[in-house]
Amino acid sequence: MRCPYSGPAGPRKGYATMSGDDLLKPITDRRFGFSEAQHLLNRAGFGGTRRQVETLRTMGVDAAVDTLVDYQSIDHQSPSPFEPSADIVRPLTRDQRRMIARIRAEGDSEEIRQLAAESRQRRSETRRTDRQQYLAAQSWWLQQMIATPRPLEEKLTLLWHGHFASNYRTVRDSYLLLQQNALFRRHAAGSFADLAYGIIRDPAMIVFLDNEKNRRRMPNENLARELMELFTLGEGNYSEADIKEGARALTGYSYRDNDFQFMRRVHDGQGKQILGRHGDFDGEDFVRILLQNPACPMFVAYKLYKHFVADITYGQLERHSAAARALGSMAKLLVKHEYRVAPVLHTLFRSRHFYDASIIGNKIKSPVELLVGTTRTLELPARDSLPTSRWLQIMGQVLFDPPSVAGWPGGRRWINTSTLFARQNLCVYLITGKHPTRKWNRQRVQYDPMGLFEGMDERGYPAVVDRLMTTMLSEGFPDKRRQQVLAFLQQRGKPVTAETVLGVLVLITGIPEYQLC
């Protein structure tokens, strides 16, 4: 496998000394060929069919980028309408609170034991029903990603889900996480500032970081700390004193049932000092101060860069001068456009830096990108969600359940011996409909791969291999990979059939370069 992004390798003349603004200058339509259009669709979405790539290529770079970024103009109905229940997890009623108080106060008796058993049964049923909705939500979102004509909307929603991370294991309320998902979707390409203001009022985040316990007499610092360290500024751009004062600003930011609730009686209304600013600040004031700090646009630009361009850590920027310069220009664009994301992506997706040889085909696919991208690129039929969910869990990316508030670490951490095995098994299942570890399947969904050769007159082995590999792999894969696939096909010694093509597709998904996009 090629080493994911290690800085421009073999840069073109003058590339190493270009300013950030020069790196973000647009490429020409003449340079926007099939591989560049494929790269754009891989990164701004989850990949696509050869026909979709060709459509973008013929548009030219400007129209192609506009189509992906300005997705609001594309009508879209959900392929699998999902109407979650908001009433599974409910606050305790007055009678229930009285009953619990009675159970605790009266001790052991037959009646009390019966009441306690009934209470446990209700809680168990609630947890079971809510978990079913949580699993349904995972399946719904995957289908959204697979079927959407607005792939950047889903790609950005996934970014913000990993950036402002909350998980089901802690929140234990699927509806609150779906509300949070709607917040990310609503502002996906809009204003990061709106996301930051929204997240301090988001019930799922409030539960996840214990801010309902953040009161004037007993401040809880969790939300204030993560708001500064992981959401806006990055580590090292604030002090412990700033966290304590920020926590005071967020006192009283709580929720009731499914809605935000400001509890004024427990809010600390006294003066505070945050990042050198003085005032009687509340949560919105706190966010405004963070957004006005010069570290914030750079940190947000970095998160966009990492998601769409290259897997580098914030501390590695000084070793990647081109990335650092590009990030500086992206940060300036964020400030200029008041934290709106779409203008930054318009510039980034047109830029010469985005299409540099060191960037194309050099980013490890996340498990979700692997699943959705394989399905979209090959136009595979829908598969049972249970096996795919289990493989996503093994590979380390479960929707609505990132491992911590830091989200998924990504990059090289996606790959190890066990996850590589699961990745291959997942692709075998997606392509063939056969579970690789079972001798039989109760349901097999047939897939005819011959449509991948649409418009091809030549069906010889070399032409077939070239078509499949250029459809599935980014530009720059080693010729030895092509020879391996060609040898596999030649060993079959018969005309190209659907069965042999399925074998080739499975073989290509096992190539190390298939893990990259």
Image (cartoon, rainbow, N blue to C red):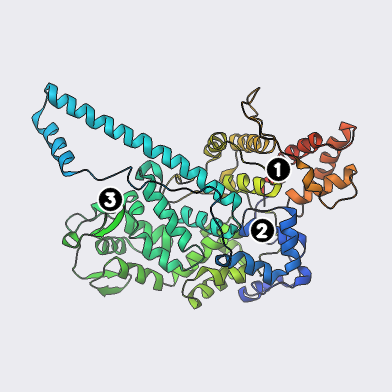
Task: Compare residues 13 and 413 and report the one nearer the observer.
Answer: 413
Task: Compare residues 302 and 318 and report the one nearer the observer.
Answer: 302
Q: Amino acid at mark 1?
A: Pro
Tell me if I can see residue 33 in this picture: yes
Which of discs 3 and 2 lies nearer the camera? The answer is 3
Q: Which residue is mark 1?
A: 512
Of labels 3 and 2, earlier in sequence is 2
Rounded to the nearest whole Å, what is the CA distance between mark 2 and mark 1? 20 Å
Q: Which residue is mark 2?
A: 41
Task: Compare residues 287 and 458 and report the one nearer the observer.
Answer: 458
Which image quadrant is residue 231 in?
A: bottom left
Q: Amino acid at mark 2?
A: Leu
Q: Is residue 87 left or right of residue 352?
A: left
Which of discs 3 and 1 lies nearer the camera? The answer is 3
Q: Residue at x 16, y 36 (%)?
A: 100
Q: Residues within 10 Å of mark 3 (few under 14, many from 20)?
A: some
Of labels 3 and 1, earlier in sequence is 3
- Whole-percent x and y of residue 102? 11, 34
Q: Residue at x 66, y 58 (%)?
A: 41
Q: Amino acid at mark 3?
A: Asp
Q: Which residue is mark 3?
A: 257
